[in-house]
Image: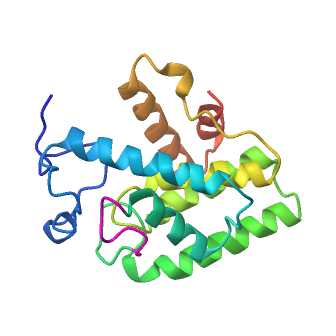
Amino acid sequence: MNVPLEGDDDASTPLTPEERRNLIPAYITLRHELNEAEQRNILQAEQWAFRRKRNVLSEDFLADLHRRMFGKVWRWAGAWRRTERNIGVEAYKIAVELRQLLEDCQYWIDHQSYPADEAAARFHHRLVWIHPFPNGNGRHARLAADLLLVTLGRPRFSWGRANLVNASDTRRTYVEALRAADRFDLRPLLAFVRS
């Protein structure tokens, strides 16, 4: 289906017209073209990120990871969001909330407050909740959580890949799990990440 780039897409955070003007590849006019370009960029970022051990719990690293995931597609890649959204903290709170998350996660790891899977799922959830970038936050937070797991000696999450037959069901389950975590029920997210 040829959905125009400006059309509604319930799979991602809507971009402002100014943010859309920062699209780098001039050939992209359809949603599937954007998705393909972003996916190619993300695959390159994954190869870079998993080549060596990284300090995932660093603001600079998280910004660089986003830039490497989306930098060939969007000029704003790796830059904190400056506009308000219907999801995420207010833009002026991003730096403070992110710093708090990184300190909290380091504490969880240092004090073994949670098993590695739970610490990574909590990290993922809070990173999505903060929503630091204009777009790509879920994909960024999933890759960051996977990198955290690998540094903790655990395998990457499967993120619902067991249900490759119906991607919309997988996305719906993921979003419902995040909403449950918003209500302090992490069980659906913990089940989803290894499904």
Q: Is residue 27 above or below residue 176?
A: below
**Residues shaded magenta:** 72-80
Work out whether residue 149 or residue 169 is closer to the camera in this orientation and state it.
149
Q: Is residue 71 magenta?
A: no
Residue reaching furthest to the right: 111
Q: Is residue 107 left or right of residue 181?
A: right
Please state the horizontal and vertical placement of residue 15, each as a whole percent of the image: 23, 61
Q: Does the magenta stretch include residue 78?
A: yes
Please state the horizontal and vertical placement of residue 189, each as a whole percent of the image: 59, 40
Residue at coordinates 39% horizontally, 59% vertically from top-left? Answer: 70
Residue at coordinates 30% horizontally, 43% vertically from top-left? Answer: 35
Residue at coordinates 80% horizontally, 69% vertically from top-left? Answer: 107
Prevalent SS, magenta region = loop
Please state the horizontal and vertical placement of residue 101, each as a whole percent of the image: 63, 70
Residue reaching furthest to the top: 165
Please state the horizontal and vertical placement of residue 136, each as a whole percent of the image: 39, 55
Question: Quadrant of the image for the C terminus?
Answer: top right
Question: Is residue 11 at all visible to an observer of this figure?
Answer: no
